[in-house]
Image: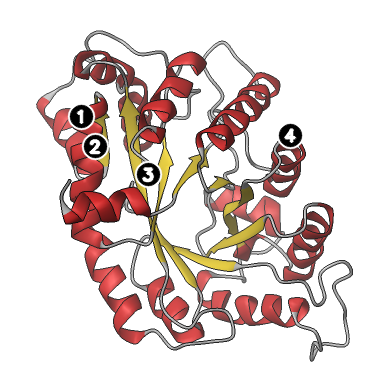
Amino acid sequence: MTTEAKRFNQIPLSVLDLAPVKEGGNPKESFKESVALAKHVEELGFNRYWLAEHHNMPGIASSATSVIIGHIAGHTKRMRVGAGGIMLPNHATLVIAEQFGTLESLYPGRIDLGLGRAPGSDQGTAFALRRTLNMGPEEFPNQVNELQDYFSDEPVSRVRAIPGQGLDIPLWLLGSSDFSARLAAQKGLYFSFASHFAPAYTIPALKLYRDRFQPSATLDKPYAMVGVNVIAADTDEKARYLATSQQQQFLDIRKGKTRKLQPPVEDLGLSPMEKQAVEESLDPRTTIIGSHETVRRGLESFQEETQADEMIITSQIFDLEARLRSYEIVGELMD
């Protein structure tokens, strides 16, 4: 076994679940499938299970992110559960502190709070959430400061987050550009890069984070996690078929269409322009499609390139059994 393979096998692997709503299905069914997946990957030895905040998207059911985090944590025993992430500009920081203080009080030592600065929605939805558009991404550093103060033992603010005050809830900054990499380095926080949909910026963002990292009470050295799309199956051919659901989803995003997750198809019938769009969005370095051996090579290669401390795997697969099998194959690669 190569040195690179050993390093890959020794890093934790985690799960990012978008709680997909499938064509012909509904959110109730999505939540049942998320519970099934969470139980499955916990038994396989995955490290953490994150859910992401999205709004006004028919194919994603995790809009009330803290609620579904509690639901998943209640159906699992050991695995960390958290947000990947909460889009902080959409919320009052006190509310997030209270919600995650409640989660940490219910499931001590198991809750993560990942924070993003994008709205995770269109402007109309952002206004419906905030009732104003004055709170922009540029306010994000101040909001992170407020949140840290609410969780501190002796907050400066006269308003207290109860539950929340004095609780040790790991804060992660999430990013798809260099902004959160700079802020995470400056504040000495955990950093997770969305390489599964912004592959081109992965290496520059990780380098910036590591080069500028300042030790803090949270971390004495940088800790970076990268996102990877994995569609694994028993054969490369089967995996490529399953991957057409995700490819349709990315094409929909490019076209501004909102649909539920579509079943796989034998032929996408792509125009040259559409094929190029899929290839740009789903870079083979960070979208790994194939059998056990193909996935192993892909993950080892990306680990060697990024030297990530952890990888978080997302698998947009229509059929639940095929999705469970995909994570089984990834799980077999762990030490």
Q: Is residue 195 visible?
A: yes
Q: Is residue 158 left or right of residue 298?
A: right
Q: Nearer the viewer, mark 3 or mark 2?
A: 3
- Which of 216 and 196 lies nearest the eye of the viewer? 216
Residue at image position (70%, 62%) is 91
Task: Check the image and name the residue furthest to the left.
Answer: 272
Which amino acid, by three-letter code, is at mark 2?
Answer: Arg
Answer with mark 3 or mark 2, whichever residue precedes in sequence.
2
- Disc on res. 296: 2
- Disc on res. 335: 3
How many residues crowd mark 4 within 10 Å: few (<14), some (14–19), many (20+)? few
Q: Which residue in the protein does label 4 denote?
A: 75
Horizontal and vertical percent for residue 202? Answer: 27, 61
Which amino acid, by three-letter code, is at mark 4?
Answer: His
Helix, strand or loop at label 1? It is: helix
CA distance for labels 4 and 3: 25 Å
CA distance for labels 1 and 4: 32 Å
- Which of 15 and 52 lies nearest the eye of the viewer? 15
Residue at image position (83%, 53%) is 106
